Image: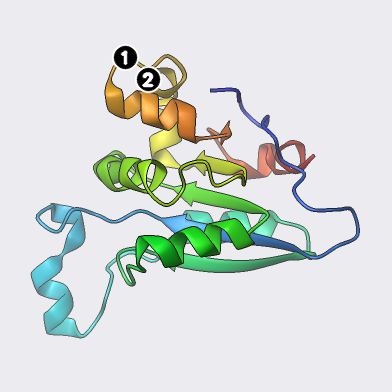
Amino acid sequence: MKAERGEGRGGAGRAGDRKRGLLLVPEFPSDSFWSYRYVMRLIGRKAAFPPLGLLTFAGYLPDEWDLEVIDLNVWAPSQRKLRAKMTAADAVFITAMSIQKRSLVEVLRGPARDVGVPIVLGGPFASSYRDQILDPRSESDRVLYEGLDALVWGEAYASTDALLE
């Protein structure tokens, strides 16, 4: 990957223009502890965990960013529709935990492939597995390495400004 903490293509859009960011949450496997698949139906909810880290990151972005959140645990658009939303964005910001790796890889192999928009991964997965992503030894890690433009680990507030430059 071409990115370290706070580096990457960044700076999408022209100065002074409104910028569009897509905040994306990969899907939890339906058979995992994290999906709470059966409990969600009983309590009338679609997801157990709102993407608080990603929403906190959104709060660090300058006011000129218009943001859309797509949580694949709540709504799974077609690959064509997801690709269109990515293409319309100036940047795609993704957060994930290790249990969401399969979904993340599917997104990067599918709708995000060669989308021409900077794709940034942060959150627990990026922080815990950055060495595997930066030095891929498996096919899925290679997909991450080649599909991501920036990898942000640690606390987002420390690198948000540098990321956007």
Whether residue 109 appears in this view of the structure is: yes
Q: Nearer the viewer, mark 1 or mark 2?
A: 1
Q: Position of residue 17 (x, y in %)?
A: 86, 62
Q: Residue at x 74, y 43 (%)?
A: 164
Quadrant of image for the C terminus: top right
Local SS, label 2 = helix
Q: Residue at x 54, y 47 (%)?
A: 115
**Protein image colouring:** rainbow
Label 2 Cα neighbours within 10 Å, binned few <14 / some 14-19 / many ≥20: some
Q: Is residue 13 above or below residue 72?
A: above
Q: Position of residue 69 (x, y in %)?
A: 50, 67
Say which of 53 and 20 sits in front.
Answer: 20
Q: Is residue 62 left or right of residue 38?
A: right
Q: Is residue 119 above or below residue 45?
A: above
Q: Position of residue 52 (x, y in %)?
A: 46, 60
Amino acid bearing label 1 = Arg
Label 2 sits on residue: 132
